[in-house]
Image (spheres, rainbow, N blue to C red):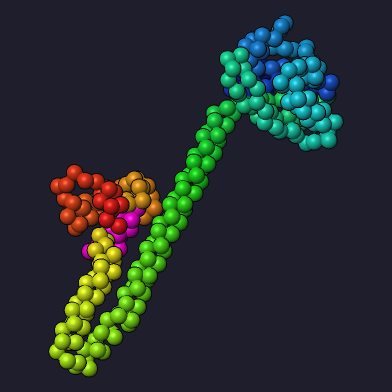
Amino acid sequence: MNLKPSVYQAILDSLPTQISIIDEKGNILATNQSWQKQAIKGKIMGRPDCIGYNYLEICEKTEGPERETAQKITQGIRKVIKAELSSYKDVYSFIDANGKERWFLITVAPIQGVKPKIFVIAHEEITSIKVLEKQLEEKKEKIEEQKKEIEEMQNTLAEILKSKEKEKKEILYSIKSYLENVIEPLVNLLEKKPCEEDFTKILEIFKEKLKELNKIASGEFKNPFMNLNLKEAQVALLVKEGYSSKDIAKILNLSKPAVDFYRKRIRKKIGLKGSKETLEEYLKKSF
């Protein structure tokens, strides 16, 4: 079926892509309605369809911020005309009259089977795609920042736990040393069964040293974490360090409601239920 030229024009006019047809010298032979609407918006003087204008000359005369892009496009078109490239594609942007950045994909290709040679130039707007790409990139950057924050929080928690483990070992070592160097010698003296007066005196010293031992041990045994399970202890440690429930949830891979539940259970176990004192204040004061 042979189509009339008017049908071909109607097909071109139905496309949202801005299309122009040029000859080997760059003269514009035809354009579609999308192209003409853009020409009117751009206030191009003369014919809105730009027929008779030279596309290459228009690009080469471009001044201002778009000059570099226009020169690059001109070079691409010339290479297609000279058959140095089978086709040319590029992405460019410009600021429109409303101050909005708009993005386009330009495609230049020869029309096959036509002599003398003619070429199609298509400008397809991809601003919405670029906006989505930018939003996606911003979200990726935000996710990476959040990952780094979580890693830093996790490292902080690991350091806190390491520090508390070190303190625990030091306390246990102090108790062990005190037992070996103070209590055991007293026990040995009592086992030798000295006279009643010496026995009573050593027993009093022994009692006194037991009190001192209790004082040493109290730093561990009065620890508010003593009756907490592992997860509760982790939550309590982070609360003490000033982390919010939201941050704690991220670090421990829990939901915020779960963290709030653990906080309530911790308050109950340490006797803070019904008290106006915050959990953070109590833990900082007690540990």
Q: Quadrant of residue 204?
A: bottom left
Answer above or below: position of 176 versus 287: below
Q: Quadrant of the N terminus?
A: top right
| Residue 53 part of the magenta segment | no
Q: Main secondary structure of the magenta part?
A: helix
Residue 230 part of the magenta segment: yes
Q: Horizontal and vertical percent for residue 235?
A: 31, 55
The answer to which quarter of the image holds residue 198 is: bottom left
Q: Name the image quarter holding residue 210.
A: bottom left
For the point 36% across and 51% down, the residue is: 241
Instruction: State left or right for residue 164 relative to residue 277.
Output: right
User: x, y (%) of residue 69?
Assistant: 73, 26
Look at 54% across and 39% down and name the residue there: 137
Q: Is residue 111 above or below residue 45?
A: below
Q: Residue furthest front?
A: 197
The residue at 33%/56% (across/down) is 237
The answer to whether any part of residue 3 appears in the image is: no
Query: Left of 118 or right of it: where is 263?
Result: left
224 left or right, relative to 149: left
Q: Residue at x 76, y 17 (%)?
A: 62
Counting from the top left corner in percent of width and height, residue 199 is at 17, 87
Q: Is residue 229 left or right of residue 44?
A: left
Q: Where is residue 217 shown, x and y percent of the image?
A: 27, 69
What is the span of residues highlighted in magenta in the rendered image?
Answer: 227-238
